[in-house]
Image (spheres, rainbow, N blue to C red):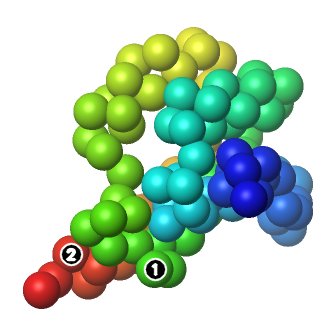
Amino acid sequence: MGQWSTFKLIDLTQNGHRIFYFIVARAALVDYDLLAFHAFQLLETISDMFDIVMDLTGVARDTELPMAWLSKSIQICPPGILPCISVSPRMGLALANSIVDSCTI
């Protein structure tokens, strides 16, 4: 299992956006810098809107993403990527609820 099974293109939405699937629990099993490089390589080829689905299944204290890495990845993200991410308020709320649920002790 590597960064290719952790972050991958899986489908198109009904409105034509590409969907990338990020399995957060698997990120702990790969080199974070290689994962970021792989994700940026995939996303740099996209010039239109896309969605990222973050699968939080199995996320626990030992598999959560280090905030330092997440912050660093956002800072070094190529400039053309962030404006292309489609953000649905409903998905954002669902993601926030999932994060809160996964962190509850």
Residue 2 at what x, y percent from top left? Answer: 72, 50
Mark 1 → mark 2, Cα distance in angstroms: 11 Å
- Kindly indicate the quadrant of the structure image that contains residue 12: bottom right
**Viewer can see residue 59:** yes
Say above or below: 90 vs 1: below
Seen from the viewer's position, the closer of residues 50 and 67 is 67
Question: From the viewer's perspective, is the residue at label 1 or at label 2 nearer?
Answer: 1
**Viewer can see residue 90:** no
Rendered-image quadrant of the N terminus: bottom right
Mark 1 lies on residue: 58
Q: Is residue 15 left or right of residue 6?
A: right
Q: Residue drawn 49% across and 80% down?
A: 57
Mark 1, secondary structure of its residue: loop
Specify the amino acid type for callout 1.
Answer: Gly
Q: Residue drawn 55% across and 70% down?
A: 55
Mark 2, secondary structure of its residue: helix
Residue 80 at what x, y percent from top left? Answer: 65, 17
Q: Is residue 37 left or right of residue 82?
A: right
Residue 103 image label: 2
Seen from the viewer's position, the closer of residues 85 and 44 is 44
